[in-house]
Amino acid sequence: MSTGGSKCLYRESRKAVREADRLRGELPEFRRKVERSLALVSGTPAPVGVSFSGGKDSTVCLHLVRCVFPDAVAGHFDSGAELPETVDFINRTTNVQMIPAEGGGLFELCRQNGYWGRDPLLDDPKRVDFFRALVLDPAKRFVEENGLATVVMGLRGDESRSRRARQIFYGPAHVTKNGLTHLCPIQDWTDDDVWAYIASKELCYNPAYDKMAGLGLDRKSWRVGIVLSADAANLGSFTVLKRLDPGLWNRLAAEFPLVRKYA
């Protein structure tokens, strides 16, 4: 089964999926959790779009949404700093719009303004609001260009304290002051739940996870976010990248030397 139309070119490996995931997917308690998530999606205002990073959580959300709204559009906010496997996976998934980041993308913003230990190219470098440039502004364009009433996101409470706080404060659905609904249908899911869904539905997923599994990395360290960020430093992702893609790591460290401090 596909991720809303993704072509599975890596099905023969699937090292990231375990037998325990398949067994968990058969549990009545887990199936009830899936039904609750589907009910949230069914009850949200249309048109519905999905924020799609190419990671496991947004992969599950995209499938849940397209079970209810088969033609739902997905939007990838393209920082220009994703893993090659992520770019390939997104390109193979149907009806995904690539929304480019402001300022030429993450790497260019860092070059121009002198981030991560390199000298700025600009004579008058600026302090960059990366969250606005990489997320907020592309998300706004995605919503406006598609006339969306709901954006579905794969945020989960057990990922971080801040996301747990968001879960407690807002619940699964939150209506912004502009009338847009933000829906997080898997906010109470665990990592094991996500992989159980992928296994039970035989979903395609980002092949970077198979590479991480093949390297024997702990499952909690499997992240496929942008390769240059404060989160990557704080969560140990630079250390993972160094093993996952040595060539990319060496290029990154050569241009942005401060990353070496975190690996």
Image: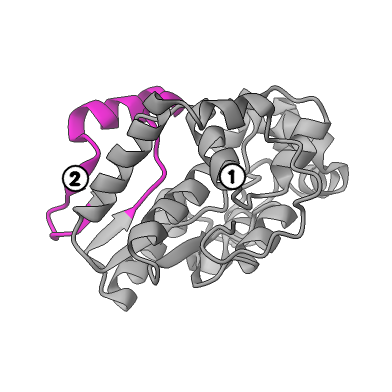
Of pointers 2 and 1, the one earlier in the residue sequence? 2
User: As rendered, which of 179 and 72 lies closer to the eye?
Assistant: 72
Tell me the element at label 1.
loop
Can you tell which of label 2 and label 1 is closer to the viewer? 2
Residue 46 in the image: x percent, y percent? 22, 66
Q: CA distance from mark 2 to mark 1?
A: 24 Å
Residue 11 horizontal side relative to residue 133, left or right: right
Q: Is 154 displayed left or right of 184 in the figure?
A: right
Residue 136 seen by the camera: no
Quarter occupied by residue 78: bottom right
Please name the amino acid that badge 1 sits on: Gly
| The N terminus lies in quadrant | bottom right
What is the quadrant of the C terminus in the image?
Answer: top right
Residue labelled with disc 1: 225
Q: Point out the stretch of residues depicted in magenta.
A: 152-181
- Please state which of residues 253 and 150 is positioned toward the viewer in this rendering: 150
As drawn, the residue found furthest toward the bottom would be 145
Q: How many marks?
A: 2
Nearest to the observer: residue 101 or residue 67: 67
In the image, residue 234 sits, relative to residue 133, either above or below, namely above
Crowding at dot 2, Cα within 10 Å, few <14 / some 14-19 / many 20+, comes out as some
Q: Position of residue 133 (x, y in %)?
A: 44, 58
| Residue at the spot 85% in from the left edge and 44% down from the top edge | 250
Q: Which residue is mark 2?
A: 174
Residue at x-position 41% and y-position 64%: 138
Q: Residue at x 66, y 54 (%)?
A: 86
Answer with left or right where residue 218 lies relative to residue 216. Answer: left
